[in-house]
Image: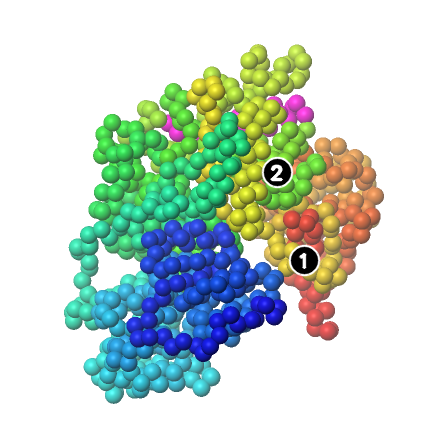
């Protein structure tokens, strides 16, 4: 610790000269985010050094000089004991900015250490504004004019900062920005700046001598207006009733609840610049959306952010550049990232604003979609699309890349739309129309109700999401009238439902023939552990292979499509039957044949009998060694990301023998996983009514109040089919009010043998939010994790908790506090709690606890 705190830069703190400029920045962040940040701010006017931990930051500060230090809050959790105070002791006078996620609850403890804290929305505008803010703070020019904002809300300060600087550049070029957070600080700044003030904006509720004063902002602006009546002022408030108070000052009023808060502020500054009511922008500046190619090879158009999904591509590109050996180790395959063009978030923001589309929030879907389709894209953007299409005639996919997409703390896969187009029409104007329509439809999906609900649940007012889009070549090959890859795959570093001999940290791999729509829609796919590719616990025998393997796949139609395409039907894709493609190369390579007279499956297409999609040539015989490559990729990516990840890819079969398979990496994202110490605590284990050391799934549930369980006092082994019917009736009753329940009982749930468990099918327990299998000797049955029932549990993400008292597990549902019986069917009892259970499942360590919230509260009151 002494080495950490040792000062390597002796001497007094250096004073900053007038006109100070930030030149060297140290940015401490989780490693996954760094490549995307580099792309977002490329080309950068600063020299930015990246560190992935506080320890690395301390080492860098000992070796080099920096003007500004950014620290993302996630980087603090590295267990090294290095704090911001340590870093400041190494480099006295260092300016520090903490970056926290919207809604973060860990802000207050940071305030004593950080010079400044901002809500980090990951926009380039905010990054530039924060650097400029530090430069203004350190400015020693006593003659420079200023704009003063009085605001104590971290959220509104962070949101308004870029907009304030835009306003300064519009109305008061050359002025600096000054921030005050209380009544007394604001008045001190007013007295100090006096005639050098250009404008003052103030919130209404502010601290005054340490106490919140509802009218503090009104008092500030009234005093200023009395002494300097010509000085522009504005009152801000989230309480619309204060608009009347603003009129009494008098001052313009900014409603902080406005859906167009940024635009309202822009109009205020524009009126100050021109001395007249603001006019709509008619002439766009030239080169408003410049084309730039980053060091990772991604091409971006615009000045905004590339969004979350594109940040994942930047991370992939950096990893492949660092590990070229991944390609040389497997000569039978080539690895690539499809050529990608990114439209940054500023294009979306301008498109929505200029066409007045934000007002359509909450409107019927058909009306919303039609309005987006009819709205024109900026002329410069259409020019970029036209140039792009002139050099590219391959099938294209347009993907979303919103700011909030694929974040570590709230991944939102599948929330926004993806569209594919054949891009082979003879008329270039129609090709342009197809691509422009696809872009606008992806934009429209940001205003779908589910997307808007997600934004409300994961961020705070006034922040909102924004959308970048990625245009990529579709991975695959053409087979007559259709285009598709041989294999689409998804891989996960952690498998929360391990089967057979697999372990949670060995991951899971899902494969499907054709385009990835099969996987995205949760349709039938082939699921294996990449460490054990020949093991198929998903299928218990020949009959399972015949009935439960993939029978349909998705492909992009390349001929005989309508001129307007079919954007509303599977995003221009067609769902084909496997039997329609039996003569196509991918089907020949990936199918096996069922031989009825032998009642067996032969791993070849070249014999008589029904074809079954088994991927045997890849999984059993390593042609190619795809699972080995996926293992290496996942290990490398997880190491570089600093945690578990998800990967989407496509594998395309070569057009001629001897040529390599083409492996296209489509996207990656952090995989949410429980922290070792935060999910299940020692106190949880002591107070839980159920403890399991063999649990499947990964979640925290706190909404289940209903318990449906097998009454051990009335249980009869020969009556399990009757029990299934009783459960079915209770399930149907609960389904009427959309109530999920905890299901508990002995033996295998969903067993086909009624002597080994309760023979329910999924429809009979479809409302189960969690399932408990009790091995107390009532039924003697080993675990079965290869059944159809288990496959459904896995697909639905329902936690499956096994309680085995022989290994110190326990469960006690008979003595729950605050519980009453709703229905007693004889064998099955339905109980309801006054307050929901708290169910925690740590999938990484296969542990689970169930807590009785009311009992926990009573215990706390007694203490």
**Who's the residue at 57% across and 71% down the image?**
5
Give the magenta range: 541-557
In the structure shown, which secondary structural element does the residue marked by tag 1 occupy? loop
Nearer-the-camera pick, 698 or 64: 64
Nearer-the-camera pick, 502 or 813: 502
**Who's the residue at 22% across and 47% down the image?**
380
Q: Of the residues under marks 2 and 1, which one precedes in the sequence?
A: 1
* Residue that carries the numbered disc 2 in the rendered image: 792
Residue 629 visible in the picture: yes
Q: Quadrant of residue 764?
A: top right
| Residue 147, horizontal then vertical, whole percent | 29, 75
| Residue 757, horizontal then vertical, whole percent | 75, 38
Quarter of the image that includes the N terminus: bottom right
In the structure shown, which secondary structural element does the residue marked by tag 2 occupy? helix
Residue 710 visible in the picture: no
Mark 1 neighbour class, 10 Å CA radius: few under 14, some 14 to 19, many 20 or more = some
Judge depth for marks 2 and 1 and give the one in front. Answer: 1
On whether residue 549 falls in the magenta region, the answer is yes
On whether residue 27 falls in the magenta region, the answer is no
Q: Which of the numbered marks, if any, corresponds to residue 680?
A: 1
- Vertical side of 412 occupied by 533: above or below: above
Q: Quadrant of residue 787?
A: top right
Q: Are marks 2 and 1 in contact (CB under 8 Å)?
A: no
56 on left or right of 470: right
Q: Which of the numbered marks, if any, corresponds to residue 755?
A: none
């Amino acid at each position: 610790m002494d080495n950490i705190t040792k000062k390597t830069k002796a001497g007094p703190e250096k004073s900053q000269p007038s006109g100070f400029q930030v030149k060297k920045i140290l940015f401490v962040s989780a490693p996954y985010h760094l490549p995307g940040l580099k792309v977002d701010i490329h080309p950068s006017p600063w020299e930015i050094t990246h560190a992935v931990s506080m320890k690395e930051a301390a080492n860098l500060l000992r070796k080099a000089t920096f003007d500004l230090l950014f620290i993302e809050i996630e980087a603090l959790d590295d267990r090294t004991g290095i704090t911001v105070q340590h870093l400041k002791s190494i480099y006295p006078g260092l300016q520090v900015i903490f970056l926290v996620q919207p809604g973060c609850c860990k802000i207050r403890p940071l305030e004593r250490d950080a010079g400044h804290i901002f809500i980090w929305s990951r926009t380039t505008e905010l990054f530039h504004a924060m650097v400029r803010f530090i430069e203004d703070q350190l400015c020693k020019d006593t003659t420079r004019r200023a704009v003063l904002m009085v605001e104590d809300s971290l959220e509104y300060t962070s949101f308004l900062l870029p907009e304030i600087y835009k306003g300064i550049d519009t109305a008061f070029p050359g002025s600096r920005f000054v921030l005050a957070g209380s009544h007394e600080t604001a008045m001190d700044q007013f007295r100090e700046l006096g005639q050098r003030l250009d404008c003052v904006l103030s919130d209404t509720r502010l601290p005054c001598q340490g106490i919140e004063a509802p009218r503090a902002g009104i008092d500030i602006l009234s005093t200023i207006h009395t002494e300097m009546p010509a000085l522009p002022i504005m009152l801000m408030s989230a309480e619309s009733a204060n608009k009347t108070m603003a009129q009494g000052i008098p001052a313009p009023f900014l409603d902080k609840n406005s859906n167009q808060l940024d635009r309202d502020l822009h109009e205020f500054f524009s009126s100050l610049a021109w001395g007249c009511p603001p006019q709509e922008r008619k002439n766009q500046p030239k080169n408003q959306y410049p084309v730039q190619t980053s060091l990772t090879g991604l091409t971006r158009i615009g000045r905004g952010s590339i969004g979350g999904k594109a940040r994942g591509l930047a991370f992939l590109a950096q990893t492949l550049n660092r590990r070229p050996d991944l390609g040389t180790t497997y000569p039978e395959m080539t690895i690539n990232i499809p050529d990608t063009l990114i439209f940054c978030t500023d294009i979306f923001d301008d498109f929505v604003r200029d066409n007045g589309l934000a007002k359509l929030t909450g409107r019927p879907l058909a009306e919303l979609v039609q309005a987006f389709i009819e709205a024109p894209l900026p002329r410069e953007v259409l020019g970029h699309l036209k140039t792009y299409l002139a050099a590219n005639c391959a099938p294209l996919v347009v993907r979303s890349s919103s700011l909030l997409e694929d974040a570590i703390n709230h991944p939102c896969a599948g929330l926004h739309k993806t569209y594919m187009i054949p891009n082979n029409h003879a008329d270039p104007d129609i090709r342009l129309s197809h691509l422009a329509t696809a872009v606008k439809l992806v934009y429209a999906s940001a205003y779908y109700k589910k997307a808007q609900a997600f934004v409300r649940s994961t961020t705070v007012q006034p922040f909102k999401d924004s959308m970048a889009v990625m245009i990529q070549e579709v991975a695959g090959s053409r087979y007559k009238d259709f285009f598709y890859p041989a294999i689409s795959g998804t891989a996960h570093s952690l498998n929360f439902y391990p089967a057979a001999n697999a372990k949670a940290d060995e991951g899971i791999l899902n494969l499907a023939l054709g385009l990835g729509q099969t996987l995205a829609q949760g349709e039938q796919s082939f699921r294996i552990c990449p460490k054990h590719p020949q093991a198929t616990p998903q299928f218990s025998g020949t009959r399972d292979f015949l009935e439960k393997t993939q029978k349909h796949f998705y492909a992009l139609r390349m001929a005989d499509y309508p001129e307007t395409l079919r954007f509303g039907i599977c995003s221009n894709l067609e769902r084909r039957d496997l039997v329609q493609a039996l003569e196509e190369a991918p089907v020949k390579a990936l199918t096996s044949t069922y031989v009825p007279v032998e009642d067996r499956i032969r791993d070849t297409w070249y014999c008589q009998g029904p074809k079954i999609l088994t991927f045997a040539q890849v999984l059993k015989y390593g042609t190619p060694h795809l699972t080995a490559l996926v293992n290496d990729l996942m290990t490398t990516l997880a190491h570089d990301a600093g945690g578990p990840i998800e990967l989407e890819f496509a594998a395309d079969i070569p057009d001629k023998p001897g040529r390599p398979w083409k492996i296209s990496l489509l996207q990656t994202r952090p995989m949410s996983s429980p922290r070792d110490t935060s999910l299940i605590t020692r106190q949880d284990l002591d107070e839980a009514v159920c403890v399991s050391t063999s649990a499947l799934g990964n979640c925290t549930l706190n909404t289940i109040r209903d318990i449906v369980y097998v009454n051990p006092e009335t249980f009869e082994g020969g009556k399990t089919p009757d029990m299934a019917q009783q459960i079915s009736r209770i399930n149907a009753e609960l389904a009427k009010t959309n109530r999920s329940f905890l299901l508990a009982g002995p033996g295998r749930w969903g067993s086909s043998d009624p002597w080994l468990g309760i023979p329910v099918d999924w429809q009979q327990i479809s409302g189960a939010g969690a399932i408990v299998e009790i091995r107390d000797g009532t039924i003697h049955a080993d675990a079965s994790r290869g059944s159809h029932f288990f496959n459904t549990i896995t697909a639905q993400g329902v936690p499956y908790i096994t309680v085995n008292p022989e290994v110190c597990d326990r469960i006690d549902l008979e003595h729950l506090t605050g519980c009453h019986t709703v229905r007693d069917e004889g064998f099955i009892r339905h109980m309801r709690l006054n307050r929901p259970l708290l169910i925690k499942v740590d999938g990484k360590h296969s542990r689970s606890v169930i807590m009785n919230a009311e009992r926990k509260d009573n215990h706390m009151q007694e203490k």
